[in-house]
Image (cartoon, rainbow, N blue to C red):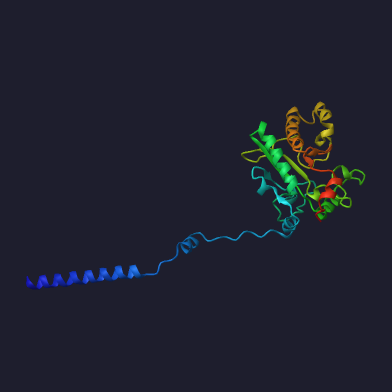
Amino acid sequence: MKYTFFILLLVNLFACGNKNNTETIAKNAPTMPQSEIQETKTPVTPEKAPSPLEQSLIDAGLANIKTEIPAVFVELKYSTTDNFFQQDVYGDLENCYLQPEVTNMLQKALVQLQKNHPELTFLVYDGVRPRSVQQILWDSLDKPDSLKPLYVANPQRGSLHNYGVAVDLTLADAASGKALDLGTHYDYFGYPAYPDREQQMLREGKISQDHLDRRLILREAMTAAGFSPIGSEWWHFNAFSLKVAKEKFKIVE
């Protein structure tokens, strides 16, 4: 009995010593700063560097419309093969750029659109277009030179797209970004796409009243913000004349 008591006493003392040592070690152990803990849990992924083309647009002082107007959608048709000559000429470029002044006008147009149609927004197909790309479009268009200016501006003269003051766009569902049907696809070269021929195309059944109504909604929002339509493309709007653009901005090469 005496020996049993003595053994139990030794076990107790040993356990207490270990506990004190453990507490001392834990207390004196170095702690990792909270900032380092956060970085370990969520490593920062570096942002993708812009392509040389996109960097040249940024350096030219142009505005990324998606950054400035998050409610719009962007689908650059010339960054895909879904265009009239089935070539990707923008490469890695996915963002659409315009002159800051024109971006502000587009913001006003969106406010005007959503005042009466809050379920709608814009889907932008093209903005600034460097003159080097304009040359590719000009050369690829299978039309006589006398008719080409109806669809693509002569790069030697310069296009309003080349100055970042023209925008190609359509209406889209504000929730999904899905484009509405306005009668023809983008870059359709024919009378059904002509605003100047809409009444004739309506009579001939080439476009419907719904198509025309949607075009009018788009046109009214854009013109209320100061944009001007053209006669051969329902999707194209200019912020300034070529004369004013040359006075205010430099062409993007």
Question: Which residue in the rendered view is the most extreme toward the right?
Answer: 146
- Where residue 248 appears, x then y in whole percent? 82, 49
Q: Is residue 102 visible?
A: yes
Question: Which residue in the rendered view is the most extreme toward the left?
Answer: 1
Which is nearer the eye, 106 or 75?
A: 106
Residue beneath the point at 72% across and 58% down: 55
Q: Looking at the image, is 213 positioned above or below residue 74? A: above
Left or right of 156 on screen, residue 193: left
Quadrant in the picture for residue 27: bottom left
Quadrant in the picture for residue 204: top right
- Where residue 112 appears, x then y in whole percent? 69, 35
The C terminus lies in quadrant? bottom right
Left or right of 239 on screen, residue 180: left
The N terminus lies in quadrant? bottom left
Which is nearer the eye, 203 or 149?
A: 149
Residue beneath the point at 74% across and 52% down: 62
Residue beneath the point at 69% across and 35% down: 113
Question: Which residue in the rendered view is the most extreme toward the front?
Answer: 248
